[in-house]
Image (tube, rainbow, N blue to C red):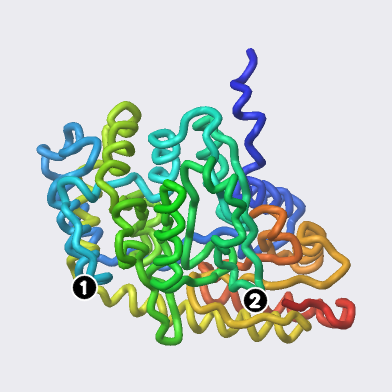
């Protein structure tokens, strides 16, 4: 049997590869601590679990989900009310919002709803690997634009060649950024909207880390920029702020025509998210927000510990302002795969090599802070022990 040729175009999925290397090391008897995958280790709030249990016990929710392709009206209203409170953005729950089975699903379905074979999709480099995979599944050609440290890892729209911009159908943006932790301002989004309108390009804003920022930083939505709803859709998720990665519940908001295109794909692909999980999502969005604040206290403490440990072995980096990742430069003369492999072999600590996010990720590693404190502290203590074996001038921005 021959598999579809599109599968041969896909790069190895980064996190599957991390899990494979972790299992191999564990099979050798290594006490592995993985800082490779961003999956909150803290529990979902109890009131959210209670809402799920109550809804799951109601036989009315045992049938196909209400609203199917767009989600329950009550969930969509909870989403638009949250956007109004959080970003002062007004959205129509009927046409400008929908439920997703996680924001990753939205990124995949927007590609199927927007891109025809041969269309061009612009993807940041480095960037979340799923964007490329989604474009490839749609049969599109992928063009990568560099995110440079000297630009704050922001897309430089002026540097995108005009002929590429004219051919492009969409561009993915993600701020706070995975993996670089970079953040954007409303002014950046204004420039993005102006560029998109000039070239008739759809802006796909993937914003699942909007609620994880430190040191008083305000993280905006792309929809705060004037005219953004003409050209943009934004994905967000309950996974990170409410510790609900396994629940698979998120949302798409923005341009009504794009939302309709995603819904059209969904109605021919899945039957929507289980009603009970949507009710749990409503409880998360409308209930106490203490969990968001308490998460930030934990992540900030872990961030500071990780940055101190990496600086102690000679790596030069600034403390990230958002996400629960640290994006760190590695010693010169080594590839990110070599350095990550060395850490695994010498310390039993798994980190993500930057090359897995694109060629511009070479020279960096990403650490996830979503592991329990004792294991993170142990991992950092092990990393500090490699200090004397690193070359001088180990790393720099």
Using the rendered view, name the quadrant where residue 294 is placed.
bottom left
The residue mark sitting in front, 1 or 2, is 1
Q: Nearer the viewer, residue 123 or 377?
A: 123
Q: Nearer the viewer, residue 338 or 117?
A: 117
Which residue carries the number 1 mark? 288
Q: CA distance from mark 1 to mark 2?
A: 33 Å
The residue lying at 55 percent from left, 79 percent from top is 303
Residue 397 versus residue 76 in the image, above or below: below
Kindly check if marks 1 and 2 are in contact, taking CB atoms under 8 A apart as contact: no
Judge left or right: residue 301 versus residue 67. right
Give the x, y percent position of residue 295.
39, 75
Which residue carries the number 2 mark? 378
Quadrant in which the N terminus appears: top right
The residue lying at 60 percent from left, 27 percent from top is 6
Judge left or right: residue 66 versus residue 100. left
Counting residues from the N terminus, which is met first, the one under dot 1 or under dot 2?
A: 1
């Amino acid at each position: 049997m021959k598999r579809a040729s599109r599968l041969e175009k896909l790069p190895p999925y980064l996190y599957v590869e991390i899990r494979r290397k972790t299992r191999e090391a564990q099979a050798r008897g290594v006490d592995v601590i993985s800082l490779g995958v961003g999956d909150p280790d803290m529990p979902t709030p109890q009131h959210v679990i209670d809402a799920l249990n109550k809804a799951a016990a109601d036989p009315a929710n045992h049938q196909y989900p209400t609203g199917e392709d767009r989600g329950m009206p009550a969930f969509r209203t909870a989403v638009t009310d949250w956007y109004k409170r959080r970003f002062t953005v007004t959205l129509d729950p009927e046409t400008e919002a929908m439920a997703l089975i996680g924001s990753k699903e939205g990124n995949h379905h927007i590609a199927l709803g927007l891109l025809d074979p041969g269309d061009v999709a612009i993807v940041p480099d480095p960037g979340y690997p799923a964007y490329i995979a989604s474009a490839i599944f749609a049969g599109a050609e992928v063009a990568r634009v560099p995110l440079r440290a000297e630009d704050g890892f922001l897309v430089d729209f002026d540097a995108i060649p005009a002929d590429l911009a004219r051919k492009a159908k969409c561009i993915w943006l993600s701020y706070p950024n995975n993996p670089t932790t970079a953040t954007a301002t409303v002014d950046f989004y204004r420039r993005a909207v102006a560029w998109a309108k000039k070239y008739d390009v759809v802006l796909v804003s993937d914003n699942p880390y909007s609620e994880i920022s430190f040191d008083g930083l305000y993280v905006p939505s792309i929809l705060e920029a004037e005219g953004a709803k003409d050209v943009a859709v934004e994905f967000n998720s309950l996974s990170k702020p409410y510790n609900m990665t396994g629940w698979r519940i998120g949302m798409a908001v923005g341009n009504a025509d794009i939302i309709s295109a995603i819904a059209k794909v969904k109605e021919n692909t899945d039957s929507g998210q289980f009603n009970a999980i949507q009710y749990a999502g409503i409880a998360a969005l409308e209930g106490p927000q203490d969990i968001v604040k308490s998460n930030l206290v934990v992540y900030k403490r872990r961030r500071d510990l990780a940055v101190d440990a990496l600086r102690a072995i000679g790596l030069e980096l600034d403390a990230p302002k958002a996400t629960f990742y640290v994006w760190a430069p590695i010693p010169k003369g080594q590839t990110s795969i070599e350095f990550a492999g060395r850490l695994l072999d010498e310390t039993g600590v798994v980190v993500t090599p930057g090359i897995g996010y694109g060629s511009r990720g070479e020279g960096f590693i990403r650490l996830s802070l979503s592991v329990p404190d004792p294991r993170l502290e142990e991992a950092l203590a092990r990393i500090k022990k490699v200090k004397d074996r690193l070359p001088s001038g180990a790393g720099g921005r």
